[in-house]
Image: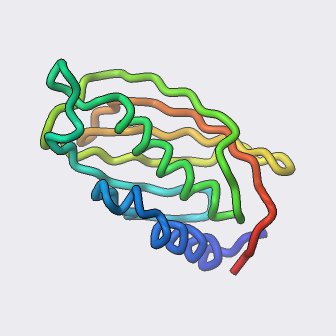
């Protein structure tokens, strides 16, 4: 069983070593065993040809929350993920992605992530994880 402090330490260490996440201005704001919340503001560099946020950045934000949540139990990687885009996102929008563990069976886990602008969901993500050998704090 993973303690809250061990889970939080794992997620914070992963964040400290995640150059891509920090370079995009994504902040890890909350962590608990099996859950995590991250925040990002959409910049002009994230816009695509229609003037809205490129879906890849929304996926990246949700995947980041998922990664921190599933790694609270120990080293884990994504085994697969799906995403539904619900509403367009614009420059300057502050997005918050919250990942919640749904089930863990052996080495496999299922996590749901909701990406919100304020209280409005703009995307839903489901990630599937697999634990891997690695160091534990």
Q: Position of residue 50 (x, y in %)?
A: 18, 18
Image point 54% across, 67% down: which residue?
14
Which residue is at the front of the view, 74 or 54? 54
Which residue is at the front of the view, 6 or 80? 80
Report the label total: 0
Q: In which quarter of the image is the N terminus?
A: bottom right
Image point 64% across, 77% down: which residue?
6
Horizontal relation, residue 132 to residue 60: left or right: right
From this view, report whether residue 94 is shown above or below residue 27. Answer: above
From this view, report whether residue 36 is shown above or below residue 112. Answer: below
Image point 13% across, 43% down: which residue?
92
Horizontal relation, residue 20 to residue 78: left or right: left
Q: How did the renderer colour the structure?
A: rainbow
Q: Quadrant of residue 42?
A: top left
Q: Which residue is most to the top?
A: 50
Q: Position of residue 26 (x, y in %)?
A: 33, 57
Horizontal relation, residue 91 to residue 88: left or right: left
Image point 43% across, 42% down: which residue?
60
From this view, report whether residue 21 is shown above or below residue 59. Answer: below
From this view, report whether residue 19 is shown above or below residue 45. Answer: below
Which residue is at the front of the view, 135 or 72? 135
Q: Where is residue 39 in the image (x, y as percent from the top left)?
A: 32, 54
Q: Quadrant of the C terminus?
A: bottom right
Q: Position of residue 89 (x, y in %)?
A: 23, 30
Q: Quadrant of residue 126?
A: top right
């Amino acid at each position: 069983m993973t303690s809250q402090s061990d889970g939080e330490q794992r997620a914070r260490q992963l964040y400290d070593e995640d150059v891509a996440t920090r370079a995009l201005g994504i902040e890890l704001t909350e962590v608990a065993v099996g859950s995590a919340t991250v925040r990002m503001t959409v910049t002009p560099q994230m816009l695509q040809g229609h003037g809205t946020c490129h879906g890849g950045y929304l996926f990246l934000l949700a995947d980041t929350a998922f990664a921190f949540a599933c790694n609270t139990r120990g080293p884990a990687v994504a085994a697969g993920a799906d995403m539904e885009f619900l509403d367009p996102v614009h420059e300057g929008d502050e997005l918050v992605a919250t990942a919640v563990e749904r089930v863990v069976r052996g080495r496999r886990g299922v996590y749901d992530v909701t990406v919100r602008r304020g209280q409005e969901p703009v995307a839903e993500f489901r990630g599937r994880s697999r634990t891997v050998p690695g160091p534990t704090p």
